[in-house]
Image (cartoon, rainbow, N blue to C red):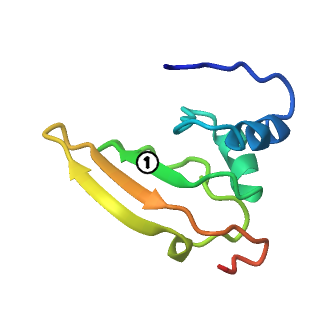
Amino acid sequence: MTCSFLIAGNAVPAIKELKQLPGKNMVLWGSISLVQSLIKENLVDEYHLQLCPVLTGAGRKLFPGEARMNQLQLQAVKQYDTGLVLLQYKAGIYMQDASVL
């Protein structure tokens, strides 16, 4: 069974509530501002990052503040014929000082 929810306003309380319900994974596509707010509340369990072979020369950071890559544990890497690479990471604990528990 697949369910979809539209959340208006601050999504953090709604996501906290949804994570307490039985079920499988939630997926978020494309909203860097939303994912940053979820990272700050330690609501992200896993990242599936797609690296595309395009250089833009600029962009926004995914991880807010002083978050460091050593907070992530690489779980899998898959390379596609198109050049796209999928990286799967298990999330660490986000803290303002970038410490890991």
Q: Residue furthest front?
A: 22
Point 62% across, 38% down: residue: 22
Q: For this rendering, which residue is in front, 57 or 80? A: 80
- Which residue is the site of mark 1? 48
Point 70% across, 76% down: residue: 98
Left or right side of 13 for 29 = left
Left or right side of 20 for 86 = left
Q: For this rendering, which residue is in front, 18 or 40? A: 18
Q: For this rendering, which residue is in front, 11 or 86? A: 11
* In the image, residue 44 above or below residue 11: below
Image quarter where the C terminus lies is bottom right
Point 69% across, 80% down: residue: 99
Q: For this rendering, which residue is in front, 93 or 97? A: 93
* In the image, residue 99 above or below residue 52: below
Q: Position of residue 67 (x, y in %)?
A: 65, 69
Point 77% across, 56% down: residue: 41
Q: Position of residue 61 (x, y in %)?
A: 61, 54
- Neighbor class of circle 1 (other Cα within 10 Å; few <14, some 14-19, many 20+) is some
Left or right side of 73 for 27 = right
Q: Residue furthest left?
A: 81
* In the image, residue 58 above or below residue 31: below
Kind of element beneath mark 1: strand
> How many numbered tags mark residues here?
1
Q: Position of residue 96 (x, y in %)?
A: 79, 71
Left or right side of 25 for 22 = right
Instruction: Give the quadrant of residue 6.
Output: top right
Amino acid type, residue under disc 1 in the picture: His
